[in-house]
Image (tube, rainbow, N blue to C red):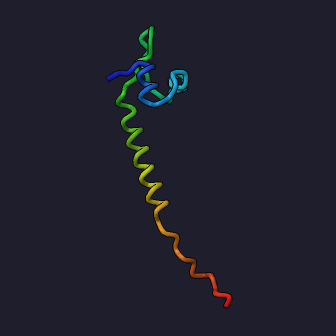
């Protein structure tokens, strides 16, 4: 399924100029049919899966308890 520039901007929650800039930088693959850009929606599924996995890893890391340092000597 292909999205127009406007649809892709809405899907990604970005502005149209930002999406167009990403296309020109070749960070988003698109086809230009002479009138408009057509962007494959499929290329974003992997990106969103990676973002979800990254969020899970960060949450897992932040939820780990801080281990006690054994080298600290009691000053009493």
Q: Residue 75: which quarter of the image?
A: bottom right
Q: At x 54% / y 25%, what residue is drawn?
A: 18
* Quadrant into which the N terminus falls: top left
Residue 35 as seen in the image, left or right of residue 73: left
* Whether residue 51 is situated above or below residue 23 in the rendered picture: below
Q: At x 48% / y 69%, what residue is drawn?
A: 65
> Farthest left residue?
1
Q: Nearer the viewer, residue 17 or 35?
A: 17
Q: Nearer the viewer, residue 59 or 39?
A: 59
- On the image, the x and y values in percent for residue 27 come to 50, 30
> Farthest top residue?
34
- On the image, the x and y values in percent for residue 17 come to 55, 21
* Whether residue 48 is situated above or below residue 71 in the rendered picture: above
> Farthest bottom residue?
76
Residue 25 as seen in the image, left or right of residue 50: right
Q: At x 36% / y 36%, what residue is drawn?
A: 45
- On the image, the x and y values in percent for residue 61 come to 47, 60
* Quadrant into which the C terminus falls: bottom right
């Amino acid at each position: 399924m292909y999205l127009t520039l406007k649809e892709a901007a809405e899907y990604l929650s970005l502005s149209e100029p930002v999406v167009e800039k990403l296309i020109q930088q070749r960070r988003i693959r698109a086809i230009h049919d002479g009138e408009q850009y057509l962007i494959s929606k499929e290329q974003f599924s992997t990106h969103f899966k990676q973002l979800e996995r990254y969020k899970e890893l960060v949450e897992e890391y932040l939820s780990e308890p801080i281990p006690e340092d054994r080298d600290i000597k009691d000053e009493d």
